[in-house]
Every structure is written in structure tokens, then in C-alpha cells.
Image (tube, grey):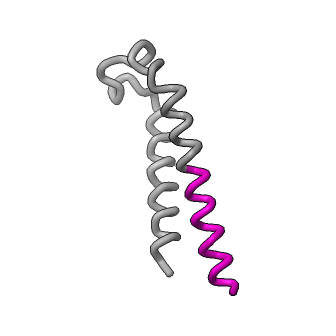
Amino acid sequence: MTRWIRDWFIVSVLMMMGAAMLFMFWAIWPLLPDRLPAIILPTLDLEGIVSILMLMIILAGFGKLLCGK
């Protein structure tokens, strides 16, 4: 029973995260060509690079958490 609840919770959280990402892309995507330069990575400062690396580490950890039964 607890495994079913845990699996249901994980699936519902993933669906909510997917819906939030879809909404963000729908709302933000039309604004990106006007605000972002053509080459993004060289224009980032240290804070931007650290935040991108932290996001990648969090995504990798979340993937390991889901796959590491």
C-alpha cells in the first residue's frame, strides 16, 4: 500500500512539474528572441554560470533519486 502511495505521489509531482514547465515555456518562449543575445554562454557572468551548473546538478540528483530504487 505504501509503495502504491509513493508511486502515485511521484507521478503526480512529475505531472505538476511538467505542467508548470509547459506553462513557463508557453508564457516565456515568445519573449526570448527579443531579450536573449545570439550567443548566451560567453555573455554570462559568474553567478549565471554557477546557477546553470547548480540546476544541472539538481536535475541529475533528481534523476538518480527516481531511478535508484
At x 52%, y 70%, the residue is 65
**For the magenta stretch, what is the residue range?**
1-17
Q: Overall secondary structure of the magenta stretch?
A: helix
Q: How many marks?
A: 0
- Residue 53 in percent (x, y) is at 45, 46
Picture layout, residue 35 above or below residue 61? above
- In the rendered image, the residue lying farthest to the left is 39
Q: Look at the image and say whether residue 4 sits in the magenta stretch.
A: yes
Instruction: Determine whether 59 is above or below 29 in the image.
Output: below
- Residue drawn where x is 53% and y is 42% of the image: 21
Q: Residue furthest top?
A: 34
Left or right: residue 9 compared with residue 38: right
Q: Going by the image, does 69 lie left or right of 4? A: left
Residue lying at the far bottom in this picture: please name it.
Answer: 1
Residue sitting nearer the eye, 46 or 11: 11
Is 69 a magenta residue? no
Where residue 46 appears, x then y in whole percent? 47, 32
Q: Quadrant of residue 45?
A: top left
Image location (x, y in percent) of residue 40: 35, 25
Name the residue rendered at 69%, 87% in the picture: 1
Task: Pick whichever, 52 or 25, lies toward us.
Answer: 25
Measured as percent of width and height from the top left, residue 47 is found at 51, 33
Q: Which residue lies at the image location 56% right of the left edge and 58% below the top edge?
A: 14
| Image height of 15 relative to 40, above or below | below
